[in-house]
Amino acid sequence: MKPLRVNSIVVGTLFILGTAFGVLAVSLEGSILNAPDYLAQMAANAGQINAGAFLQFLMAMSCAGIGIALYPVMKLHHEGQAIAVAGFRTIEGMIQVVGGVCTIGLLSVGQEFVRAGTAEAANLQALGTVIRAGSDWLSNGPMLLSWCIAALIYYSVFYQYKLVPRWVSAWGLIGIVLIIVSSVLITLNIVHTIDPFQTFASLPIAVQEMVFAVWLIAKGYSQPATTQQA
């Protein structure tokens, strides 16, 4: 197989893995972290939380891998943009790793919480609130911003040079713009992370990335566009 064909399969696979790991992590952690007594719930489900944090790590590696794998293709068209995509998606992955560390930190706080007396419990609840607030800000601010900047760059290049059908790239650009709007509204505390608007804003890009991934695996990059640049 030609190197660019192998590359398209790798990139598509990483997109699918990143989404799969993220969905599995949320399914394991989501209901526990959103529970009113989340510290006690985390302590009672330590194995589940540890598994979720590990999946966050795998998602981080997949997301960073996307930027790195896209570098040789992006470089054919613009080296600066290729570096930017690799850099921003690596930053996104690093922040996701920090998110996993915050989850493990919350687990430790929860375990101390169930063993603590009444006086210490209030302090541990406050500590848990601080950790959650920092983790939420990182996830809905810097992490999403890094992903969105990278995605805007590579979908623009894919659209301009027709590396995939333009409707796929245009769909990605629209989806990313919706995510940016959602991220800004959450950061300004206009909407909340569990608001239906966020679900609505996230759905287009979630579906698009799977379509994009399957296209790359099944069809690859447009050969005339990549061959001409190479």
Image (tube, rainbow, N blue to C red):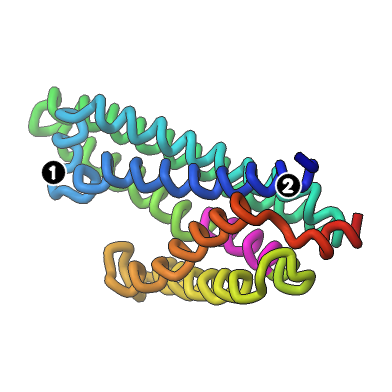
| Total labels drawn | 2
- Amino acid carrying label 1: it is Asp
Say if the magenta span includes residue 153. yes
Could you tell me which residue is drawn at 83 percent across and 58 percent down? Answer: 226
Could you tell me which residue is drawn at 20 percent across and 47 percent down? Answer: 31
Residue 196 appears in which quarter of the rendering? bottom left
In this rendered view, identify the residue nearer to me: 72 or 186: 72
Q: Residues within 10 Å of mark 2 (few under 14, many from 20)?
A: some
Check disc 1 and report the residue beneath it: 37
Could you tell me which residue is drawn at 51 percent across and 72 percent down? Answer: 175
Q: Which residues are magenta?
A: 143-155
In this rendered view, identify the residue nearer to me: 139 or 68: 68
Q: Is residue 188 visible?
A: no
> How far apart in space, not on screen, are marks 2 and 1 (Cα)?
50 Å
Main SS type for the magenta part?
A: helix
- Amino acid carrying label 2: it is Arg
Could you tell me which residue is drawn at 27 percent across and 63 percent down? Answer: 194
Label 1: state its secondary structure: loop
Residue 128 appears in which quarter of the rendering? top left
Residue 75 located left or right of residue 32? right
Q: Is residue 125 above or below residue 191?
A: above
Question: Where residue 88 sits: x, y (%)?
Answer: 66, 52
Report the quarter where the N terminus lies.
Answer: top right
Question: Where residue 111 sits: x, y (%)?
Answer: 21, 26
Numbered label attached to residue 5: 2
Marks 2 and 1: which is nearer the front? 2
